[in-house]
């Protein structure tokens, strides 16, 4: 079984389309989404429709929660984007399509067990909105211990938009340090972040995702270029979306 792991799409249709197209050459059996389909980007409705169509399951991210309920503790740019995102779903004229999308968003879970993996958006400790940053492996030993105490074997997370692998040493390994792949080890716990499809923040603007090969017990990371200028132009055309949301895509931050 080969499972594609995507996260943090953030309404970026161009990036999501490229990632889904790439999967067709990778013999992927199923796709799972770790949350934040929504927020920031100009095509939230289209991205939700694709996730409904393509994904075996999806999780609730903090921006999905913010658009569906309330954008609590968001900065001004993110809050305005959340309200605009909600309005795009409310503007749907077809009641059946609208109901299908609202039902899907309302049914998103915060935690799912998938084989040997716990799947959350943030961390197993706070599944919707806690960040697990690479530097936490060095600077926050108590946090790392508490997070790994909630992981029986392996865990999949998103939220930081930074791909890589945490181990319970603790340590963090970006994909470049792993030559693009990681072999799961029965002797250590691991937390894997596939990075962000629609808004990478590791200074690499290319879309990021990963594939879990359950038979070979390995994870492979992928980076894919997409038409950032097209997304930037769409963002600029929406007064409620800050131009900065397009500018950051070009810089991968």
Image (cartoon, grey):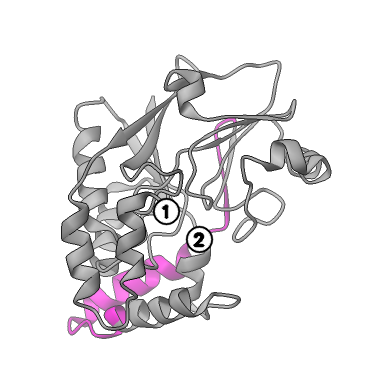
7 within the magenta span? no
x%, y% of residue 74? Answer: 55, 75
Q: Callout 1 environment at 10 Å: few (<14), some (14 to 19), or many (20+)?
A: many
Give the total number of marks visible in the rendering: 2
What distance separates the C-alpha of mark 1 from that of mark 2?
A: 8 Å
Q: Which mark is residue 61?
A: 2
- Dot 1 or dot 2: first in sequence order is 1
Q: Callout 2 environment at 10 Å: few (<14), some (14 to 19), or many (20+)?
A: many
Q: Are marks 1 and 2 in contact (CB under 8 Å)?
A: yes
106 within the magenta span? yes
x%, y% of residue 80? Answer: 41, 81
Q: Is residue 130 above or below residue 158?
A: below
x%, y% of residue 253? Answer: 43, 53
Which residue appears farthest toward the right when viewing the image? 142
Name the residue carrying label 1.
Answer: 8
Q: Nearer the viewer, residue 144 or 21?
A: 144
The mark lying in front, picked from 1 and 2, is 1
SS at mark 1?
loop
SS at mark 2?
loop
Residue segment shown in magenta: 88-116
Residue 164 lies left or right of residue 101; in this view the side is right
Q: Nearer the viewer, residue 11 or 246?
A: 246
Q: Which mark is residue 117?
A: none
x%, y% of residue 109? Answer: 53, 59
Residue 208 lies left or right of residue 151; in this view the side is left
Q: Is residue 218 visible?
A: no
Residue pictured at 57% horizontal, 19% vertical: 184
């Amino acid at each position: 079984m080969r499972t594609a792991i995507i996260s943090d799409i953030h309404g970026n249709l161009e990036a999501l389309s490229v990632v889904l197209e790439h999967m067709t050459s990778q013999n992927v059996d199923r796709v799972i989404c770790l949350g934040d389909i929504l927020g920031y980007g100009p095509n939230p409705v289209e991205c939700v429709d694709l996730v409904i169509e393509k994904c075996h399951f999806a999780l609730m991210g903090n921006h999905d929660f913010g658009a569906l309920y309330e954008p609590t503790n968001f900065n001004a740019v993110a809050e305005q984007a959340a309200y605009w995102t909600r309005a795009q779903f409310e503007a749907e004229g077809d009641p059946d399509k609208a109901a299908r999308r609202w039902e899907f968003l309302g049914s998103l879970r915060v935690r799912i067990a998938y084989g040997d993996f716990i799947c959350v958006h943030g961390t197993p400790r706070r599944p919707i909105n806690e960040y697990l940053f690479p530097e936490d492996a060095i600077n926050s030993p108590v946090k790392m211990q508490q997070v790994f105490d909630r992981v029986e074997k392996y865990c999949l997370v998103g939220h930081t938009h930074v791909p890589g692998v945490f181990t319970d040493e603790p340590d963090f390994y970006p994909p470049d340090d792993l030559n693009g792949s990681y072999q799961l080890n029965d002797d250590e716990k691991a937390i894997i972040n596939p990075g962000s499809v629609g808004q990478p923040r590791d200074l690499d603007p290319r879309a990021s995702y990963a594939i879990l090969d359950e038979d070979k017990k390995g994870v492979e990371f992928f980076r894919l270029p997409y038409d950032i200028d097209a997304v930037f132009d769409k963002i600029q055309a929406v007064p409620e979306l800050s131009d900065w949301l397009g500018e950051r895509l070009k810089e991968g931050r």
